Amino acid sequence: MQRFIRQTILPKFGDEAQQKLLNSKVLVIGAGGLGCPCLQYLVSCGIGTIGIVDGDIIDISNLQRQILFTTNDIGENKSIIVKEKLKDIHPSTKIDSFPFYIDEKNAIDLISKYNVVVDCTDDFKTRYLINDVCAELSMPLIFGANYQFEGQIAVFKMDDSTINLRDVFPTPPKQAMRCEEAGALGAVLGILGSLQALETIKLITEQKDGLNNEMLYLNLMKYETIKIKISKKMSDVRCPMSGNTIIDLNVEEFIGKINNPMVQLIDVRNEIEIPKVDFECIQIPLPILKENIHLINKEKEIVLFCHIGVRSLEALELLQDEFDFKHVSHLKGGIMKYFSMK
């Protein structure tokens, strides 16, 4: 136990917690930007058995964020190479390598062999498959996702009292940008993958302060974190990792968009509503937004506003879901918030 002495001397940890780690079996699905740091910390802390599922081949573009790989590994399977690297970190850990993708045919068989699943994947079809199988098997799931500088972490314990991914996001988003399109920064993924490892350790060692019916949102560019309490069939939580991100602008951000030639401001209130604004915009009332979609310049950033922010949010979702607008946001609190700050 000398290897783990620095963590066993921690308060509320000790030899008992360490033994739980040594007896645990964790399946990590995805050995990319999230999976690499997560796997390193899991094997280092003394997880007894780790399974790694990934059918992808290492590419030179992976190396800036997938820190277990080197130039010499290009062209090799990620799962196989990760197993070799992790064995050097802790030779006593049993490591299972599955050099293929998880799918409907193998998911139940794979997941049922472990105690905890960590989702480090980057596509929504796979995320929902993992979630559904874990829910069916009552298998705890550590969820992590990334979009540019943002991230989400959640722990779905899959018992009767806790939620799962479909309770928060009932269906996959219609549009989803992968890192090839959205971009990815290695340090951001490193933090998120480390948090997944931390929540896994908390769960296995039965710490009381792990995420529980909560989702942690992080913006690592601004160092903003929000921990949101979530419940079953929660319909008002949106996923910032999809192409359908709900972007709420505060008043200061909104003011920064005024008079910007690359921004089109749209008032979705009815024409008779007051107060009238004191800046240039176009007015397209929400009820006739669809038939006037040609008035909106898709080449510009679109910023919507209404009286208190309800209709502008509805308009935003309409533009995203039905017309595939990518760069659209709305003023949270509406134009009344704007005038109250002036």
Image (spheres, helix red, strand yellow):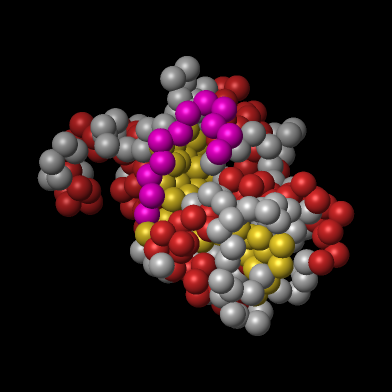
- The mark tally for this picture is 0
Q: Residue at x 57, y 51 (%)?
A: 307
Residue 330 occupies quadrant = bottom right
Quarter of the picture holding the C terminus:
bottom left
The one nearer the camera, 106 or 332, is 332
The one nearer the camera, 203 or 305, is 305
Query: Outermost residue toward the bottom?
Result: 261
Q: Residue at x 41, y 59 (%)?
A: 340
Quarter of the picture holding the N terminus:
top left
Q: Is residue 185 above or below residue 141?
A: below
**In this rendering, position of residue 204 left or right of residue 50:** left
Q: Judge whether residue 130 is colored magenta.
A: no
**Residue 162 appears in the figure:** yes
The one nearer the camera, 251 or 247, is 251
List x then y, in percent, for residue 317: 69, 49
List x then y, in percent, for residue 123: 66, 51
Residue 275 occupies quadrant = bottom right
List x then y, in percent, for residue 176: 69, 54
Q: Is residue 24 above or below residue 321?
A: above
Q: Which residues, given as a range, are shown in magenta?
A: 225-236
**Residue 115 appears in the figure:** no
**In this rendering, position of residue 289 left or right of residue 145:** right
